[in-house]
Amino acid sequence: MKLLDSVINRLQIKTQWSKRRPLCFVIAQFLFVFSGQARSLDVVSVRPDYYSIEVQSTRSADKPRIVSTWAHATFAGERYRALMPTEMVRGPMTKLDFHWSPGSALAGGSEKVELEWRWLDSMQWQTRLLGEGFRDPASGHLILSPTNLNWGEERSGKVQMRFMIRDGLGKTAQDGGPNSTLNLQVVRRDALAALRFSEEWRTLQQGELLAGESFEIDYSLARIAQQMSADISEDSPWCLYAKVQFDDGPVQNYPLLAAHREYPEKVIGIVPTVQIPTNARRMTLWFFAFHDSNSYFDSNFGQNYQFIIKQR
């Protein structure tokens, strides 16, 4: 009990009741050890193998939009994924899946769809075929297929994307109009720095946090798990996020758990990669978990974790 008391004194906990479940794609159930004592999760943390993005076409003059971004990981031969902040992917490869908007007239009137993309600092566009000629017999929509984009091991930066659609008359136009290019931030595969939050309540920094570069968050799940109910065998939703804010900008939620593709009650820890804005000077970081209508915070006694971002 001394260990548990020590941990509780170090962790600020807030609890609130909510009639609505959180909008998480995870999680149903965790495995725990040491029944009746302080808990630690029987879950490992892994780095994502690759990212995928889902893009939806437009029905008007608006540009296409990124619907979701997923980080995919493989552990013990099984596949897991976590929903990441949009418009950022981690190299060296990304799977892009382009979908028609519900009710889009383009879906039935198109003969060919191509993705064109380029690095922001390059004038050369590269092309990927997404669909041509084949239609869904039930809906009449042109069938679209995913494509893989290879960024390279060391490459990072902004990528521009546009979707070119050819109709039955042979006329080609950009989906959403000529000013509807999407921007995507590609983060290099190996982050230059890492922040590690250990079960022993230590914060370890590896490398420098540099503006315009990236870092990893390696968080010990036991920091949160030790504070939860001893009886959690019931199915109930889980969320666990790192909340990241640069200067006074918006707060981004980075998941620290990934769910099994077929059995969502099975989870693994995931190590997210965070891109630092080029003009950032400081970063604020804290952790949030939600389980069975209870909220839990790891927030450095309510002060949050503060870091200085160095300029190159």
Image (cartoon, rainbow, N blue to C red):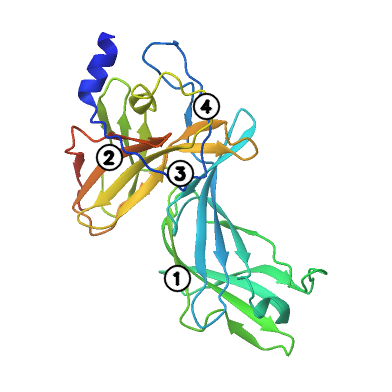
Tell me whether circle 4 and circle 2 mark residues in contact (CB < 8 Å): no
Q: Nearer the viewer, mark 2 or mark 3?
A: 3
Q: Mark 4 and mark 2: span between their CA atoms? A: 27 Å
Of all residues, the one furthest to the right in this rendering is 137
Label 4 belongs to which residue? 234
Label 1 belongs to which residue? 122
Q: Mark 4 and mark 1: span between their CA atoms? A: 53 Å
Report x, y in % for residue 194. 33, 37
Label 2 belongs to which residue? 286
Q: Which of marks 2 and 3 is nearer the N terminus?
A: 3
Kind of residue sitting beneath label 2 = Trp
**Residue at horizontal 26%, vertical 23%?**
201
Q: What element carries label 3?
A: loop
Q: Is mark 1 on a helix, strand or loop?
A: loop
Report x, y in % for residue 250. 28, 57
Q: Mark 2 and mark 1: span between their CA atoms? A: 37 Å
Quick check: 93 above or below 290? below
Q: Earlier in the sequence, mark 3 or mark 1?
A: 3
Q: Earlier in the sequence, mark 4 or mark 1?
A: 1
Kind of residue sitting beneath label 1 = Ser
Neighbor class of circle 2 (other Cα within 10 Å; few <14, some 14-19, many 20+) is: some
Kind of residue sitting beneath label 3 = Arg
Label 3 belongs to which residue? 21
Quick check: 174 above or below 219? below
Q: Is mark 4 on a helix, strand or loop?
A: loop
